[in-house]
């Protein structure tokens, strides 16, 4: 082994300390950078969720999407999009779409809601909460209520 | 058209006549009312009529009939209603007139409906003066809109209004009717929703019995009445063996298991009480009951465990948004399962039971994975502590080196 390449004890100690300080600096600044960097992932505080492309919906087609962990039913009518909480106001079942009646239907106790979210048949006591809809660059965005 | 009550025209005339004619009007020979009539004429002449009935005029002023004058109903004669039939006919003189009711959006068939009710039948065919007539439920001078919380006919006040007669043991005994129906109703789930939770869509007496046409539903109509709200259960019940028994008159549809006035929130406990009423000595049917109860309890137990695990994970700070969505799905399946039991067919229940168990299994697996990841993150603290320890040793060595002044 070439003795000229021998690293002194002081130099080795300095390398170790330098590496340690660098690791500490990365650990210290990375959380700061995560705030500065734009958010890439969906999180619980997200206020608006995409239900898909506007062109993916035919008239009277529906889709259930999760907004803040809660199901929301999106309906395309000839007049535009409507979105309502998909949780039935009776016993909390997830509602669906009755194509024949063109109404939102609860599968548990046959509760029906019209396209304003108002209960029109069955036991639901209150209307479904409505969510705002915005079309952004052809994307159907559902706002949290 | 003006109301056609015989006294109204005379009373209207009274206000337009000179004093001599007023006295003449007062002295018309109607022995039962001449004294009262004369008193009113004197009060009218002195301008004291309203003051003499201040309490009543205040009630009328606050009522839906504020625009009416006393004489529109009384014609200057408080005794102008010799019996309850006259009351019904007086009210109907306006309320059966479609043209008069149209501006208020009110139906004009109340009297016709009333005549079909047990109350109306007794009044018009037997001249029973104890039965309820318009003023017993709506009030006389203080009639308020149905949506007013002070109205006797407000949904939350209906049990008390009906109870004024139907909880009167002495009165009900004359008709051989029970007087505990209102007390029983108040123990029901319907009353809990209406009176405790303020849910005005919950059924009151009139939801099942009708209001103006109040009559108890017959055996064949019970399912129809309950099915107005509980349509899904009715539909499923029609697929059950009990539907045939009900058509044969052997089974009183919903109320055979759920009771009528004291309807409790349905739970699996009901299977223990209701089925044995008819099937106590029928092991085959009891085994079917146990199978259905087992499916519901298994699914409910699995759901409760999953809900507990999700709640615990949420409290610990784990991101459980997806699992909460799955819980909603499991709740939907289990609620459908509980309704499905009306078919009394395990094969019909099985898809919902299986789906509930599948969703619960997904939830528990996801929560397990989240907890494992959290455990791994906690384990990562060990290398961090080792790193800090090594750094401490290195700083100690560096300090010693500097203190020694060792150039190498």
Image: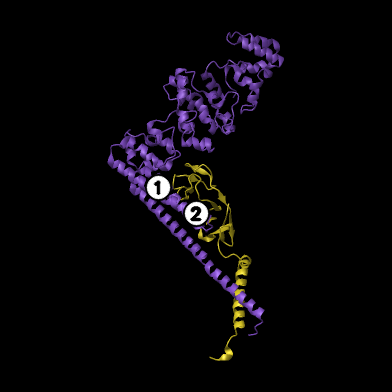
Chain colours: A yellow, B purple
List x then y, in percent, for residue B257. Answer: 38, 36
Q: Nearer the viewer, residue B397 or A43?
A: B397
User: The C terminus of chain B appears in which quarter of the rendering?
Assistant: bottom right
Determine the secondary structure under disc 2.
helix
Q: Please report, as a chain letter, where disc 2 is located.
A: B
Q: Are marks 1 and 2 in contact (CB under 8 Å)?
A: no
Q: What residue lies at 66% left-to-right and 9% top-to-bottom?
A: B24
- At horizontal 45% and vertical 56% (from top left) the residue drawn is B363
Residue linked to disc 2: B312
- On the question of residue B399 being in view, the answer is yes
Residue depth check, mark 1 versus mark 2: number of the one nearer the observer = 2
In this rendering, is residue B29 above or below B66?
above
- Chain to which mark 1 belongs: B
Residue labelled with disc 1: B337
Tell me which corner region of the image, top left, top right, bottom left or bottom right, holds residue B403.
bottom right
User: Observer-nearest residue: B20 or B64?
Assistant: B64
User: Badge 1 local density, few (<14 within 10 Å), some, or many (20+)?
Assistant: many
């Amino acid at each position: 082994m070439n003795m000229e390449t021998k690293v002194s004890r002081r130099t080795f100690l300095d390398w170790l300390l330098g590496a340690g300080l660098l690791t500490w600096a990365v650990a210290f600044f990375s959380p700061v950078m995560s705030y500065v960097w734009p958010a890439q992932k969906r999180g619980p505080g997200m206020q608006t969720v995409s239900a898909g492309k506007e062109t993916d919906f035919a008239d009277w087609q529906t889709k259930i999407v999760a907004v803040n962990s809660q199901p929301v039913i999106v309906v395309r009518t000839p007049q535009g999009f409507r979105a309502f909480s998909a949780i039935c106001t009776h016993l909390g079942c997830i509602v669906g779409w009755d194509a024949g009646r063109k109404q939102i239907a609860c599968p548990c106790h046959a509760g029906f809601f019209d396209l304003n979210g108002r209960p029109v048949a069955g036991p639901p006591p209150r209307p479904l909460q409505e969510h705002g809809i915005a079309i952004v660059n052809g994307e159907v965005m559902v706002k949290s209520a | 058209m003006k109301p056609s009550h015989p006294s109204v025209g005379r009373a209207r005339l009274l206000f337009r006549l000179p004093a001599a004619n007023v006295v003449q009007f007062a002295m018309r020979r109607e022995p039962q009312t001449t004294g009262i009539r004369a008193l009113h004429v004197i009060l009218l002449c002195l301008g004291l009529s309203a003051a003499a009935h201040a309490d009543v005029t205040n009630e009328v002023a606050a009522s839906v009939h504020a625009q009416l004058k006393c004489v529109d109903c009384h014609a200057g004669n408080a005794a102008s209603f010799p019996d309850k039939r006259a009351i019904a006919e007086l009210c109907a003189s306006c309320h059966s007139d479609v043209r008069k009711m149209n501006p208020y959006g009110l139906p004009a068939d109340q009297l016709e409906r009333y005549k079909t009710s047990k109350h109306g039948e007794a009044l018009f065919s037997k001249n029973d003066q104890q039965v309820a007539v318009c003023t017993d439920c709506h009030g006389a001078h203080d009639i308020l809109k149905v949506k007013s919380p002070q109205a006797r006919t407000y949904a939350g006040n209906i049990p008390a209004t009906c109870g004024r007669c139907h909880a009167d043991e002495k009165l009900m005994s004359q008709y051989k009717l029970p007087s505990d129906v209102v007390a029983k109703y108040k123990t029901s789930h319907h009353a809990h929703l209406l009176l405790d939770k303020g849910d005005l869509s919950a059924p009151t007496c009139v939801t099942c019995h009708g209001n103006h046409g109040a009559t108890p539903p017959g055996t064949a109509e019970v399912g129809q009445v309950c099915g107005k709200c509980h349509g899904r259960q009715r539909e499923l019940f029609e697929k059950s063996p009990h539907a045939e028994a009900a058509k044969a008159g052997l089974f009183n549809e919903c109320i055979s298991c759920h009771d009528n006035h004291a309807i409790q929130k349905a739970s699996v406990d009901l299977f223990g009480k209701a089925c044995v009423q008819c099937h106590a000595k029928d092991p085959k049917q009891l085994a079917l009951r146990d199978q259905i109860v087992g499916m519901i309890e298994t699914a409910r137990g699995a759901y409760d465990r999953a809900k507990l695990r999700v709640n615990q994970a949420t409290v610990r700070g784990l991101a459980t948004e997806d699992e909460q969505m799955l819980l909603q799905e499991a709740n939907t399946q289990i609620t459908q399962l509980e309704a499905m039991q009306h078919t009394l067919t395990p094969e019909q229940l099985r898809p919902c039971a299986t789906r509930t168990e599948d969703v619960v299994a997904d939830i528990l697996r996801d929560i397990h994975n989240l907890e494992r990841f959290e455990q791994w993150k906690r384990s990562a603290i060990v290398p961090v502590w080792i790193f800090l320890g090594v750094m401490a040793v290195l700083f100690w060595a560096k300090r010693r080196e500097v203190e020694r002044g060792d150039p190498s």
